[in-house]
Amino acid sequence: MPSNERIPEAYRTGYQDFYGREFKVTPDVLIPRPETEQIIDQVLILAGKPYLPGVKPTERELSKNPIILDVGTGSGCIAITIKKELENSKVYASDISKEALNIAKENAKNHQADITFVESDLLKNIDITPEVLIANLPYVDPGWDWLDKDSLSHEPALALYADDHGLKLIKDLIKEASSRKVKYLILESDPCQHEEIEAFAESHDYKLYEERGFIQTFKYD
Ligand SMILES: C[S@@+](CC[C@H](N)C(=O)[O-])C[C@H]1O[C@@H](n2cnc3c(N)ncnc32)[C@H](O)[C@@H]1O
C-alpha cells in the first residue's frame, strides 16, 4: 500500500502545470514531468518554430500539416500542447489505459484541442502512419538501485515500469515504427538507457538525429 504521507501535490490539487498550461491529473495518470517538456521544444524545432522568445527558428523539417502521434498519452499533456502550439498539425493520441484516455479527453476538451484518441497497445489499433511518432512510454527498471520507489508509489505501475531493464516497450515500438517507415521518432527514456536505445534503433534503420536531456530523436534512414 502506498504511504499517505507522500501523496504528490498534483494528486492533492488535481492539477499539474506542463509547458505553461494546467492539466487535470488523477492517480490513473502519470504526473507530467518537466524533462518531458523538451519533447515539445524538439517538435517546434522540427516545425521551424522558435521554442523560446528570441531564439531564431531553424529551417522547417516537417511538412506544413504534419500528422503527429503521441503513444502512451496519459494525461494528454504532450498531444494537447503540440496541438495548441502547432495549430496546423493533425494530432492523434493513444494509450492502452481506458482510464487514462478519459482524463486525456477531458483535458483536450478543457483546452479546446482537436485530437483523435485511440485505445491501443502500441501501434496495434493505429491505422495511420504519422510523420512524427512521440512516446514517453514506461521505462523505469524496478531494479535500479537509485530508485525511490516510495515516491513513485502513488502513480500507476502501468505508466512507470517495463521489462527488459525498462526497455521492452520502447524496443517494441521502434520495431513497429520501423516496419511502417515512420520518419521521426521522439522518445523519452533515462539517459543511462540512451546508448542501448540508439544501437537498437540503428539496427532498425533509425539514425540518431538529436539528443536533449531525456529525449532522443531518430530519423528513418
Ligand atoms: C510514462 S507515462 C507517460 C504519460 C504522458 N505521455 C506524459 O508524458 O506525462 C506512460 C503511458 O504509457 C501508457 N502505456 C503503457 N503501456 C502501453 C502500451 N503497451 N501501449 C500504449 N500505451 C501504454 C500508460 O498507460 C501511460 O499512460
Image (tube, helix red, strand yellow):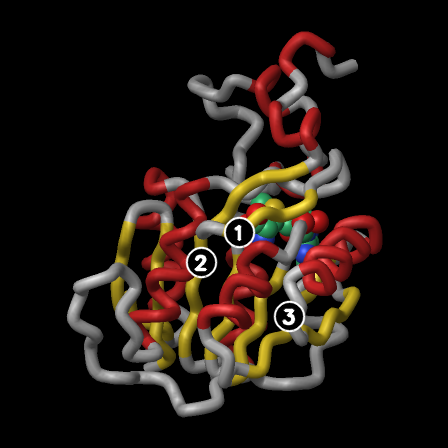
Of tags 1 and 2, the one toward the viewer is: 1
Say if mark 2 contacts mark 3, CB within 8 Å. no
**Residues packed near mark 1 inside 10 Å, few (<14), some (14 to 19) or many (20 plus):** few
Name the one closer to the observer, 217 or 30: 30
Say if mark 1 contacts mark 2, CB within 8 Å. no
User: Percent position (x, y) of residue 56?
Assistant: 16, 71
Q: Is residue 169 visible?
A: no
Residue on which disc 1 sits: 21
Which residue does the image show at 69% across and 41% down from the upper left? Answer: 25
Ligand 1 lies under 8 Å from the Cβ of mark 1: no
Residue on which disc 3 sits: 113
Question: Between disc 1 and disc 2, whose residue precedes?
Answer: 1
Q: Amino acid at mark 2?
A: Leu
Element type at marker 1? strand
User: Percent position (x, y) of residue 71?
Assistant: 61, 63
**Residues packed near mark 3 inside 10 Å, few (<14), some (14 to 19) or many (20 plus):** some
User: Percent position (x, y) of residue 79?
Assistant: 57, 64
Residue on which disc 2 sits: 187
**In this picture, is 113 found above or below 4?**
below
**In this picture, is 156 found above or below 207?**
above
Q: Amino acid at mark 1?
A: Arg
Q: Is residue 100 left or right of residue 168?
A: right
Element type at marker 3? loop
Element type at marker 2? strand
Which residue does the image show at 64% across and 57% down from the upper left? Answer: 76
